[in-house]
Structures are given as C-alpha cells and as structure tokens.
Amino acid sequence: MRRKFLLSALLALTLLASCGRRNEGQFTSEPGMSKPLTVVMDPNSEPESGFDPAFGWGAGEHVHEPLIQSTLTVTNPDLTIGYDLATGMEVSQDGLTWTVKIRDDVKFTDGEPLTAWDVAFTYNTVKKTSSVNDFTMLDRAETVNDYTVVFHMTRPFSIWPYTMAIVGILPEHAYDPATYGSHPIGSGRYVLKQWDRGQQVILEYNPDYYGPQPRMEQVNILFMEEDAAFLAVQAGQADLAYTSATYSDRSVSGFSLLSVRTVDNRGINLPVWLSSIDEHGTVVGNEFTWDPAARRAINIGIDRQAMIDHVLNGYGTPAYSVCDGLPWYSPVNEVEYDLEGAKALLEEAGWRIGPSGHREKDGMTAWITIYYAAGDSVRQGIAAELANQLNELSIRADVEGVSWNEAYSAALSAPLVWGWGAHTPMELYNIYHTEIYGDLANTARYSPYSNERADTLMDAALACTDLEESYALWQQAQEEIAGDVPWVWLVNVDHLYWVRDGLAVAEQKIHPHGHGWSIVNNVDQWSWE
Amino acid sequence: MRINRRAGTLFLLIFACILLFVIALAGEALSKPAELADFARKNLPPCLAHPFGTDWMGRDMLARTVAGLSLSIRVGALTAVLSGGIALLLGTVSAICGPWVDALVSWIIDLVLGIPHILLIILVSLACGQGFWGVIAGVALTHWPSLARLVRGEVLQLKQATFLRAARRLGVSRGRVLRTHLLPHLLPQLFTGLILQFPHAILHEAGITFLGFGLSPERPAIGVILEESMGYLAAGRWWLALFPGLSLVLVVMLFAAAGERLRLLLTPASAQE
C-alpha cells in the first residue's frame, strides 16, 4: 500500500514536471516579434493528412482558408467572390471554359515564383486525389502562358469561383504527396513552422507575402477537448479558445465570450413520399410526413427561438434555410411561429386528436421518430426539444440516437437532425436536386423528394455565366421548394469563443458548418490592443 | 430478543436482497421519467424536488440514476446466471469426464484468463453487435473461468470423499450420485461465486459503456451517465457524476456484502459462528 502511494506520488510529480516543461517551450517567440497568439481548437480540427490541399486541407465538409497556401479567389465578408491570386476571370458563353489571369509577383516560401503551371498542376492533382471535394465538373486545367490558366469543364458550373476559393495552390517543383502534408510549401500568409501531432501547430508569418503584412506574427494552435480548453482559459494559457453553450454561463476574469454568427445550421428532413420498401429492403418514405399539411404544420408550429433558448442557452439564430444570410438566400423561406395556425392546418387535413391524445387520421397515428447522431449533445437536445414541441401539436414524436452508419438509411423514412452550412450554393443542389444516377436516381440524395421545376432552376443556375444572375436563380429554386417543405430548418448554432481582453479579433464572415479553423481565416488582421 | 450473529447476518442478507430488488423494480417504473427532457428545469443543482439535480436537458438525475442502476442489476443478474451456468457445466465435466476433457477445459480456462478481461469483453461485445445483448455476452463469456476452476477443484475433492465412494460401491447410479451427493455439496460454493460475480458484471457493464462499446447512449445506464457527465465537470456540474457514481459504488458494495454473508451462512465451517 505504502509503496503504491509512493509510486503514484512519483508519477504525479513527473507528470507535473513534464507539463511545466512543455509550457515553457510553447510560448517562446523570437526576439523582436509581436506577442505570439495561442488559439485552442477541438482535436477533430487537426488535419489528419496534414496541410495538403489535395488531401482535404481547407476543403471538404468544414471549409476555411488554407492560410499556408494562396487561393485563386476568396470569399468576401458578405460571401461574394473576391480575388487572391487571380487578377481577372472570364467564362465562355457555353460555361465550359474558365480563363483566369493571376498575379506575376508571387513567390513560394522557397523562393521559386508561383506561375500558371503551378495552378494547372494543382487543379489536375486535386481532381485526381481529392476525396473530400467533388471535381467531376472539371475536365482539365491548362496553361496559356506563365500567368494565365484555362479550366476546361465537363459541364457548366457557374459557381466555380467558390470552388477556386478553397483550393490552395501547390508548388509543382516541390510537391511530393508523401511528405507535403507535414512539410508544406506555399505562398500564403503563414508558414508552418512546427507541427507536433496531437498537440499543436505553430504558424509563423511569411515575410515575403505579397499582400498586406500579417499583423499577428506567430500563431500557436493547440488541439484540446472542450473541457480542457475551458481549463486552459481559466489558467490563462490560451488567448482564444473555442467553447460551447455548456460553458456560456460561466465567467473567466480577463476573458470575454465572443459569439460569431454562423450558417452552421441544424434542421430535419421530412420524407415527402408515401412509404414503400425499395429493392434493398430499406423503407423509403413516411405515411405522416407524406401529407403536405403535416410538413407545413411542423414548419410553422416550431418555436425556433424557444429551441435556441433551451438548447443553445440563447446563442443561435432561427434557421429558415440551409443558407441563411448568404447571397443566394431567399427570404421566402422565413415563416412566423404560429402554433394555432399549425393546429388548424392539421385539423383541416383530417388529423384529429384521438383517444390516445395524439392526432389520428383513417386509423393512422401522427407519429414520427426523430433520429440524431448519437454522441452529439447539441443534436440530441434539439431532437428532444423538437419532440416536446411536436407534442404541443399532439403529434407523437420519439427520439432515437443512431450511428452515422444507420443514420443515412434511417433518414429515408424518418426525420434526422442534420447539420449543414457551406460557403457555396452547391449545398442547395446536393440537398434538393433529384439525383441523376446511382441507387436513388429519382429522388434527392438524403431524403425522398423531387421537384422538377426546382431542378430546372438549379440546372439553369449552374449553367449561368454570371454569378449575380445565378444567385437569383438559386433564390427562385428555393421559392419553388418552399411550398413543399421537404426539410424544416431549425437553428443556426453560434460559434462561441473565449477571448482574452486586449485581443482584437477581426470581423468574421458568417461561419460555415464546423467549429474549427474558420475563426482564424483572418488571423493575420488580428491585433493586440 | 437477542439477535445472534447468524440472525444478524441473515437479516443483512435479506435487507440487501430486498433493496436490490426494489431498485430493480423502481428503475423499470422510472424509465419514462428518466428520459423526459424538460428544458425549463435544466442544470439544477441538487434541491428538494430533484435530490440528485438535473442535467443539461432537464432530465431528473435521481430517476436516471435509479433507472441506470436497475439496468445494471438486470445485466448483473443475467450475466451472473449465464456465467455461473457455464462454470458449473464446464467445471463438472472437466472433473468427471477423464483426463483428456480435463486437459482441454483447463486449457480453455487458462486461455480466457490469459487475455486481459476488459479487452476480451470489448471484443465479444463488438462481435455481438453491442447493445444490451452484446454487453451480456461480453461479460458472461469472460467471467466463468475462475468459477469453473473452483467448481472443478471442488468436484475433484468430492470424488475422493468416502461417502461418495461408498455410494458408488453400493451400486448407486451415476446420475443419482450427481444429484443427491455431489450437487448439494457444490451449491454453496456456486451460489457464493454467483453472487460475487454480480458486482464484477455491473462494474464491467458500466466500464465498457463508459468507453463507448456497450449500451446505446439513450439508455440511462450508469456508464452512459458517467460518460456524459465528464463533459460538464469543468463547467462546475459536479452532481452529474457524484451521485450516480456513488450509487454505483453502493450497489456494488451491497452485492459484495450479500455474497459475503451468504458465504458465511452456507459454508459449514462458519455457518454456526
């Protein structure tokens, strides 16, 4: 017993000692540099394959600016398109050829100039290797001269500039897929100085950067679980750390809570088809949500603000579409909360309250199971709150957590709590457009639904040669879809951060889905007051 | 009335059994309220209305804890019976069916004992599709060897006993010897082993559920509750972990105490003390 005690005491001491040592090394900076910035992100934000745009860095489900590499375009704070490397772009009348001119004064951090050859090489490489982004619309990239590149498309794709905003440009002369991820060479605002897997990333400013000199010269990024991040803030070891509504009622001296508006939405799909069993034995469709009145009643019968107050401690905004606040968003999606109206809709459609206390029609109970990804406490809370609110409408709602393996097929016949929100209109297409090939060739990808007129409008939006015009077509598609209510959008989850007093975080553009790298998109413009 | 130690022991045993039984029943009755989310009362520290507090979805932690314990007790009971059955069968077979069978069974026992418990439970539970039955299979299939070894030793010893050899010589059939002479001597050991298996099973159930290989996260199992509470400890919600954790320890101690009393009562050497 005594020996055990001694042993554990010794162990604790060693642990403490090693912690202390790590901290010393972590915060040193070279003399003459501004105070380094320490940012805490969740462990999932650490890029598994490193900082290689060909393997998902900056792209994929959680888009952000690649920082280490330059991109051709960028998204402006209002999510319209601006230029980074590009100086101009043109698209041919048939939408199949994009010609992009680039700057001639850009160098990689190894001193080599960045030319159109690197751009073409990058796009041809990501088309081959990217597992997180769709590049099927790109046929090939070609160079016209050192500073002009041409993209040949397989189909018109008006929102190509949004894809160009997330592809970091690789150096053709120094690209080895095996090592690039851990030793990236780019032309962006920062250079990867050090990466300790599972712990931290140290970024240092690029002195030869072609744009405005970054004001924050060294950025340390630590990866920690939410509770550890909070403790790090309490101990004053971080300057900015992600957090969630769980901790929002706490206060830490010397820090304040920053809430960033997002399009990181949560919503449910409502299967529009009558249920049947497909050739794989999967149930597709739902007897209750098949009724348009039921879908409309759910849409207006949900008190989104109550949901935000209950589940997110008030840190969120009501969601009415997958793209709230983005240039292609149509206000037609907005609905007023109207509980009585929702009840009236159900009554009118024949759903009357039966002896069980739930609504019934032709011997069928108004009954849905709301699925959510097990382990996600926000989605669990939303599902529970939604079930409570549906009970107010006398709709029986059960809640069940499932793994992602089961979730996709569950969503074909029942509502699932989803999270979306990307900086590209392509998301509308992915959610609402009827699939052209594959297993579900006559329905949208995630939930049984199909609307030909909306499909035509979205196809027209993609074929359009003018971005502004395409926004209008995306909006018209939403107006077409709004009457069908195939999805009900619930809330946009604010992204919360603890920020050290004196740190001025630059204005954030609406954050996309994913509570990770987005916050440091413009870390070069942050400053110490 | 003077209570002698035997009566005291018996009293404690009965008390433990009744308490466990009540918890098991109460949990079943509380399974609905345990899942009821009411955001109007979220994050309440322990108070009169909610002695164990509420969690971030406004679920009553007392209801959840009792429901979780009830589930644990049911898992414990089922696994103890199953692993006890396996142990009795293999132990007896090993002792009376000749050297070959004995060597084989002993080898299997060594094999199972040789692999770290928790690893084997996770493997079996995963292979059986997790969930309630995965956990049961995982714990039952890993907890029989020590009991089987005990049974085997006991049977080997009994086989040499004079009364048994006399019975055989008198021409009593094998089955009858097994029933009337062997089993009655074996049962005390087996019962005690069985009951002592309970706390093990419960802790393992909570353990692998905590690690994410066991029961599904909707079930108000103690492992799930403890796992969830981890995320809120740093936010100052200590009651989410403290009370369920303490209750688990208490139930395990109750089982251990019941097993110990039973052993005292059933073992001839200590039964009259």
Image (spheres, coloured by chain):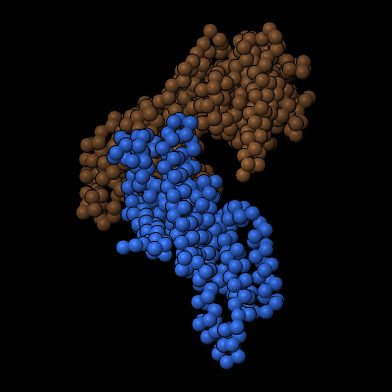
Indicate whether A355 appears above or below A444. Answer: below
Give me the chain that's brown: A
The percent position of residue B26, horizontal first and vertical second, equals 34, 54
Indicate whether B39 appears above or below B248. Answer: above
> Is residue B127 left or right of A494 when viewed as pictured?
right
Q: Report the quarter where the N terminus of chain A lies.
A: top right
Furthest residue in direction bottom, as rendered: B171
> Is residue B156 left or right of B236 when viewed as pictured?
right
The percent position of residue A514, horizontal first and vertical second, equals 52, 30
Residue occupying the point 55% across, 25% down: A232
The percent position of residue B215, horizontal first and vertical second, equals 48, 51
Say which quarter of the image contains residue A332: top left
Q: Colour of chain B?
A: blue
Q: How many marks?
A: 0
Say which quarter of the image contains residue B160: bottom right
Residue occupying the point 66% across, 56% down: B115
Residue situated in front as seen by the camera: A472 or A356: A356
Residue situated in front as seen by the camera: A289 or B215: B215
Kindly tell me whether residue A131 is visible in this rendering.
Answer: no
Indicate whether A529 appears above or below B38. Answer: above
Residue situated in front as seen by the camera: A406 or B32: B32
Residue occupying the point 57% across, 92% down: B170
> Is residue A33 left or right of A81 when viewed as pictured?
right
